[in-house]
């Protein structure tokens, strides 16, 4: 089973890369599979790649559900 999680773009970088916020962590991911990414967008992230955009309301609902389950970037076991 694979899991893709919502992350918000905090900075646009060169070469189809952006910095995203995942909970309290910041990661650099590729946006080569998604067009027209802007700061503030929510992206669906899977293994270092954005695989789509997500409506902000849906992203917040998903993040709230993950938090309710105890799934955080520092507790990956909760994603299983």
Image: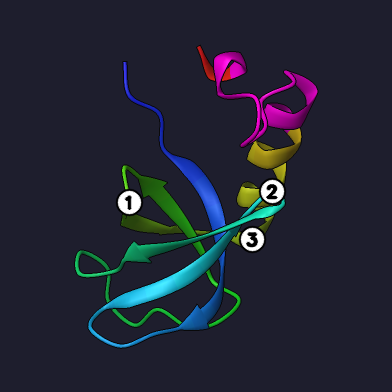
Q: Which residue is mark 1?
A: 48
Is 62 placed above or below 66 here?
below
| Lateral position of residue 65 relative to residue 37, left or right | right
Q: Which residue is mark 2?
A: 23
Magenta segment range?
Answer: 65-78
| Lateral position of residue 41 relative to residue 35, left or right | right
Label 1 packing within 10 angstroms: few (<14), some (14-19), many (20+): few
| Lateral position of residue 52 relative to residue 27, left or right | left
Q: Nearer the viewer, residue 29 or 35?
A: 29
Label ID, residue 61: none
Q: Which residue is mark 3?
A: 56
Classify mark 2: helix, strand or loop. Answer: loop
Quadrant of residue 77 within the rendered picture: top right
Q: From the viewer's perspective, is the residue at label 2 or at label 3 nearer?
A: 2
Quadrant of residue 50 within the rendered picture: bottom left
Cα–Cα span, label 1 and label 2: 15 Å
Q: Where residue 23 sits: x, y (%)?
A: 69, 48
Cα–Cα span, label 3 and label 1: 20 Å
Classify mark 3: helix, strand or loop. Answer: helix
Viewport quadrant of the N terminus: top left
Look at the image and say whether residue 68 sits in the magenta stretch: yes
Q: Where residue 43 sits: x, y (%)?
A: 46, 59
Q: Where residue 17 sits: x, y (%)?
A: 32, 75
Q: Earlier in the sequence, mark 2 or mark 3?
A: 2
Q: Earlier in the sequence, mark 1 or mark 2?
A: 2
């Amino acid at each position: 089973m694979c899991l893709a999680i919502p992350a918000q773009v905090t900075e646009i970088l060169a070469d189809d890369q952006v910095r995203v916020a995942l909970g309290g962590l910041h990661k650099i991911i590729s946006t080569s599979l998604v067009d027209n990414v802007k700061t503030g967008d929510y992206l669906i992230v899977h293994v270092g790649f954005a695989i789509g955009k997500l409506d902000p309301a849906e992203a917040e609902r998903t993040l709230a559900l993950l938090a309710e389950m105890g799934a955080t970037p520092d507790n990956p076991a909760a994603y299983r």
